[in-house]
């Protein structure tokens, strides 16, 4: 339960910033550079759920094959609100290999969900799109997503959303329109409530400078997702709120306020890719303003309802191996 002290701290955060950053961080402490053990990561996640910044925290991320390893830690899930997990699927380079691996993954997920009886649940899978579909036709992508959905039906999976990671390379970016259209078509065919909403995943960093995608390519993904009405999530390289130069990696790094602020304003004002790219390139934190009634960047603004709608339907969350670093950097900018 939230303490009076935590409530007081949250009262000092502008409503527009709260709305923009609500449940924005998927905690991935198992992954580099944190590389925590499962016990360490679960302990950290449990602690974060009790901190004053818990409103920023979303799912716990782990590989699907690690789900059975959670059994010794059942006590972590006995208190507070239910735990939600985003799993990294096995995937495959072509359609058949992917679907065979998915069938096995779904069995593991089903066993896990039954074992924990609602106290812990897997409701998101992140997985690379098969390489054979990169830059492919809309028809082929639609047939693949339909086959994925059929696997869910066969397994009896009640609810599992998918985010397909695509490489931010020229060939894949060129094919984004067809891919986004196929995802949109799949989502439009879902019943209410949907069994599976599908979207995209963008990797914003990594161990090498070449792992950081260009603002041009990220802007293309944001606009493509916006135009098609599909969601996306991000991962890697987003520990800092604002775009900046990273000495260790020797390259410019994306900021999560740039990324999610750009998505909000793209949805609010129907910005084109070049306009979105300009926001992604912004390095002056004071050009982002958070007030009681809304958020603005330079001369563009979005209402609380606009921010909330974009976060619910377009830009959902980002994975980070650290929860403390994004929070600390927000404090450094006097935003928290």
Image (cartoon, rainbow, N blue to C red):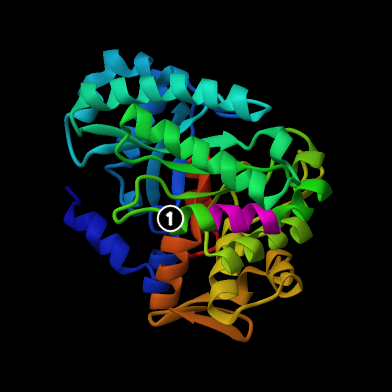
Nearest the eye: 333 or 167: 167
Q: Is residue 254 left or right of residue 230?
A: right
Question: Considering only vertical position in the picture, is 269 above or below 93?
Answer: below
Is residue 321 visible in this depiction of the protein? no
> Residue 39: x and y, percent?
37, 19
Nearest the eye: 48 or 127: 127
Quarter of the rendering containing residue 103:
top left
What's the magenta bit mostly, secondary-structure-wise?
Answer: helix
Q: Is residue 332 left or right of residue 59?
A: right
As helix, strand or loop, the secondary structure at mark 1 comes to loop
Q: Which residue is mark 1?
A: 189
Q: How many marks?
A: 1
Is residue 215 visible in this depiction of the protein? yes
Q: Is residue 6 left or right of residue 25?
A: left
The part of the chain drawn in magenta is 177-184
Question: Considering only vertical position in the picture, is 90 above or below 147?
Answer: above
Q: Is residue 232 left or right of residue 6?
A: right
> Residue 138: x and y, percent?
66, 52
Q: Residues within 10 Å of mark 1 (few under 14, many from 20)?
A: few
> Residue 18: x and y, percent?
38, 65
Question: Considering only vertical position in the picture, is 81 above or below 121?
Answer: below
> Residue at the location (74% across, 47% down)?
168
> Residue 222: x and y, percent?
63, 62
The quarter of the picture where the C terminus appears is: bottom left
Residue at the bottom extreme of this rendering: 299
Q: Is residue 134 magenta?
A: no
> Residue at the location (43% across, 35% down)?
150
> Residue at the location (23% across, 29% down)?
77
């Amino acid at each position: 339960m939230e303490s009076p002290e935590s409530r007081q701290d949250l009262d000092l955060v502008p409503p527009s910033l709260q709305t923009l950053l609500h449940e924005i961080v998927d905690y991935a402490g198992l992954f580099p550079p944190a590389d925590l053990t499962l016990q360490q990561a679960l302990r950290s996640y449990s602690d974060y759920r009790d901190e004053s910044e818990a409103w920023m925290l979303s799912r716990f991320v782990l590989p699907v094959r690690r789900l059975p390893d959670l059994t010794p830690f059942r006590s972590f899930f006995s208190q507070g609100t239910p735990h939600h997990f985003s799993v990294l699927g096995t995937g495959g380079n072509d359609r058949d290999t992917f679907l065979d691996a998915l069938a096995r993954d779904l069995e593991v997920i089903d066993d896990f969900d039954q074992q924990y009886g609602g106290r812990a649940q897997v409701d998101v899978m992140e997985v690379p799109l098969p390489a054979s579909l990169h830059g492919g036709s809309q028809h082929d992508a639609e047939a693949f997503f339909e086959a994925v959905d059929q696997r869910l039906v066969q397994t009896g999976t009640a609810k599992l959303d998918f985010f397909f990671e695509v490489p931010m390379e020229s060939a894949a970016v060129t094919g984004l329109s067809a891919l986004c259209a196929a995802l949109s078509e799949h989502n439009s065919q879902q019943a209410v409530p949907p069994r599976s909403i599908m979207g995209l995943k963008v990797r914003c960093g990594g161990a090498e400078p070449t792992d950081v995608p260009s603002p041009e390519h990220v802007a293309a993904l944001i606009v493509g997702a916006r135009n098609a009405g599909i969601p996306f999530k991000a991962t890697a390289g987003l520990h800092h709120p604002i775009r900046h130069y990273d000495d260790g990696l020797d390259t410019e790094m994306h900021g999560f306020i740039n990324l999610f602020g750009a998505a909000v304003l793209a949805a609010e004002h129907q910005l084109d890719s070049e306009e979105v790219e300009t926001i992604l390139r912004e390095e002056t934190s004071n050009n982002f303003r958070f007030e009681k009634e809304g958020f603005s960047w330079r001369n563009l603004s979005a209402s609380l309802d606009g921010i909330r709608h974009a976060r619910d339907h377009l830009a959902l969350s980002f994975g980070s191996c650290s929860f403390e670093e994004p929070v600390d950097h927000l404090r450094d900018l006097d935003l928290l």
